Amino acid sequence: MTSLELRNISKGFKSGKVLEDISLSVKAGEIVVVFGPSGTGKTVLLRMIAGVHYPDTGSIAIDGEDVTDASPEARGVGMAFQNFALFPHFSTFENIASPLEARETPPAKLKEQVGAIARMLKIDHVLGHAPRELSNGQKQRTALARALVAQPKVLLLDDPLRNVDAKLRYEMRLELPRLLRTFNAAVIYVTQDYKEAMALGDHIAVLRNGRIEQWAAPGDVYREPISVDVARLFGDPTINLLPCKLEINGTGSVTLLGRRAPVSGAYAYAAGRDLIAGLRPEHVVVTETAAPDAIPFDLDAVMPVNVRSVLYLRGPKGEELLATVGETEAAKFGRGHRKVWVRFAPSDLLLFDAASGQRIAPQVH
Amino acid sequence: MNQISTLERIIRGVLIALVLVFFLFPIFWILLMSFQNNDQILRIPPSLFFEPTLQNYLALLTGRLETTAGNLDIAFMRNLGNSLLLSTCSVLLSLALGVPAAYAFARYKFRLGENIAFTLLSFRFAPPLLVLLPLSLFFKHLHLTDTYIGLIWVYQLICLPLILWIVRGYFEDISPDIEHAYRISGHGWWKTFRKIAIPLARPGIAAAGLLAFIFAWNNFIFALILASASKQPVTVGALAFVTASGIQYGQIAAAIVLSVTPTLLLALYAQRYLVEGLSLGAVKG
Amino acid sequence: MTTATPHAQTATRRPGRHRLTRRALPYLLSLPALLVCIGILIPFFTAVYYSMMRFRLNLPMMKGFIWFDNYISFLSDAAFWNTMSISLLYAFVTVTGELILGLGIALLLVRPTRINNAVSIMLLLPLMTAPALAALMWKLMTNPNFGILSYLVGLLGFTDFRWASDPSTALLTVVLVDVWVYTPFIMILLLAGLRSLPKQPFEAAALDGVPRSFVFFRITLPMLMPYIITASLFRLLDSIQQFDIVYSMTQGGPGDTLMVFQVQSYLEFFQYTNVGRSAALLIVLWAITYALSNLFIKHWLKLRERAHGPA
């Protein structure tokens, strides 16, 4: 059953068009992450679903009912804002109780429901406090509690973990999916953090230039990005991109870094095109000793990042490459400034058309 | 600058004392006069020490004045009542009209709003007679001369612009997301206005109201032109009082004291907001 | 599976009735303010109209449209030039005096000690007094028979000092009242301005041992200039239209020594019932204040932005 449905939503302001032909649907209990760099209109999209802005064209339906022109209070959605937007002159209790109070819930039931959700979010001990006395983490939980307390059909979360410190953000990233599943609402979660998107979403809508560039499950977005830009947005460090050309001589191959790498014949249709080959840093194999098919590289620096290390490599023609290796592996390389050998599996290559940036998929017969 | 020589401190102190004397002496002196009878007032040299008397105030309060020429009825208390009535009603009306308009100007950017704001601002600096003189002719036709309603309407010219400028700034300072969150929670715009916008802007509304009251009370020219003796506030009434013959000087002083005390007390009470209000928001108080 | 856009089902559409009420809301809210605006504009344009007429209330049959004759007649009218010069003189003398005095007091009180703050609050009182009543107070104080000021001035050797009744000292007297009432306004504004100035330049100057007069003229004054200009323009605007103080004190007298614009216009209307001339006089005054107010608003908005952040 589809709880939330957007069709052909467009929105423009005096400064220009922000959203163009956005369509998506979210089922009850599903979490859809709207992901994109800042300024791409993610917040505008959320606000249109909530009723704060109104779309220029298109329709919005909740549970099959058209709400495109409905006022915010009539839509029955819950929303948690990035900057919390708590009512400063209400207590925490009154903040959370607000949606129930609007629905004229009797006082006893209201108290019970507010208490229940406060316990669930571990803020029951600050219910009597004013918002300014709360920590950022507590404020965010209050905003969440307020959004959830009336069991809305649609839940909108506008980058709720952005203003929360790193440790708490990590904890909440684990806690949120569990919390949200108990409510069975259709959830739209907006974020700029791709790790958050991949951790929380059942589906990810990648928003760029006002359009949905890709709509897929997190793993698919990572493994099969629809374009170079999407490939760049997901992955840390950023994916390695190298120009190359596709040749077909019986079987297909691309010439990359001076070596010929065989690719499936299913790419034959793209013969002769200028391509960009993408290789994720974790797929770059670095060894101390030469191996067949390995290319000599200069290892310029080794940068430890948590339990991995990023290797900065420079090729014979000046090509720059990043590789990630585990801690123990990295130890072998010391501080860098030495020669190493680089290999990769051709099947790990992602091929993109140089002109359009779109990924080339192997043609299926 | 932490190094201030003692000499400088003394000079500073003397100068401040002189300034205080200059600005507070008139009020102080009139206050003294209001407790003196005519003989004491006319005594030369004037002295700070005398037997105070309440007869001036009594005469004003009871409305009867005993002079050497006989008994006189003074309607000064009525002037005081008029001031109170006109100022209070004008401020209440201007708040009722101005606060929603200030909200509209703060939250919505629309051409008409900017034009209204500009016109009212522009006429704040225009000579009042320019509007008042034709208005006095109109009032004659509309039978609004010498009515409280006519005066309260005209007083909006003083109060409304003040309310609009001060309160608009306070509404603009409230983050719109707070109002959005309240509406998404399920409340309509009127409830949002009442329960969120107004409470959060309350200091500004109070400040604007107090300031508007003070300006309405102190107004002279509007009432001079459009009110007759029975509806005059104290500013006009006091002048008429003075020019009437046979009035005791102590009573004039007492009348001035009674006329001036309300605004002075209000000013002391609201002084936190005065800077911001007087400069129309150019300086944050 | 990866698709470019997800599949969406059809949904029914409801008419957009709510859109209209949404659009109308701001206009409804500002309707009363609009009415007041109209209530101001109608008399204003009427006044413009009257100013171009020969119109005396006691001679209604002589009413007629004469275009700009009223204005042209001003050019050769001694009374008009008297009004113009007195008004300008009054405005400039009061504003200059208030500026110097206000700045001096603000500098005295600039440090936010308890005493200084208490003093600045006390100094608000004259500003909150009705100017008409302030004039009355000073009238009593300058009364030749019992006025304390007459007495004090007599001690200095000026016997028979007639204050407002004497043409040579009338202007001085009303200027004194004006300064008494309005200096606190400039003082408050400049004090707030002084306290909001950034501390670094002054700290740096103190470290470098720069003499105080230099600091004042080359650092303080230039940084304070926006406040000074705004405050001066504001007071100039009010001062040139002064009515309350002058009318309460002398009704424009003695003779016509204090015939400032609005007093003159008032008398033209009520004493001579010359509506046309009265209106023309006011339009001239309005033109001056309009020009000044545009200048003022520009500076005021800049200060406002500084205090509140960009609109």
Image (tube, rainbow, N blue to C red):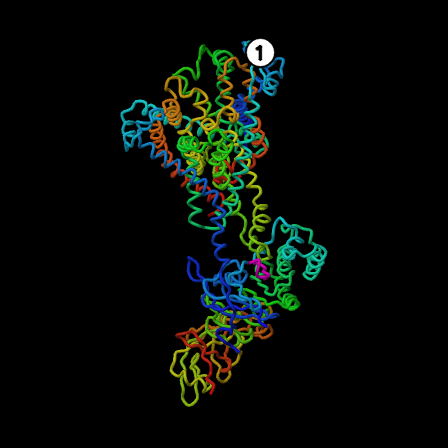
**Type of amino acid at the residue the image marks with label 1:** Gln
Give the image quarter of residue A184: bottom right
Q: Position of residue B78 (x, y in %)?
A: 56, 24
Front residue of this view, candidates B171 and C95: B171
Q: Is residue C102 visible?
A: yes
* Relative height, residue C80 to residue C38 (above, below): above
The picture places residue B211, in percent across and down from the top left corner, at 53, 35
Q: Nearer the viewer, residue A15 or B149?
A: B149
Would you name the residue on which mark 1 appears? Answer: B40
Q: Residue at x 58, y 62 (%)?
A: A157
Quadrant in which the N terminus of chain A appears = bottom right
Question: Compared with residue A147, is residue B196 higher up or lower down, i.e. above or below?
Answer: above
Q: Is residue C198 visible?
A: no
Q: Position of residue A44 (x, y in %)?
A: 50, 61
Q: Residue furthest bottom?
A: A250
Horizontal side of C216 relative to A153 (left or right) equals left
Q: Is C19 or A44 nearer to us in this picture?
A: C19
Q: Quadrant of residue B38?
A: top right
Q: Chain of mark 1?
A: B
What range is drawn magenta here? A72-81
Asked whether B180 falls inside the magenta stretch, the response is no
Q: Position of residue B263 (x, y in %)?
A: 55, 29
The answer to whether residue A266 is above or below residue B100 is below
State the residue at coordinates (42%, 42%).
B118
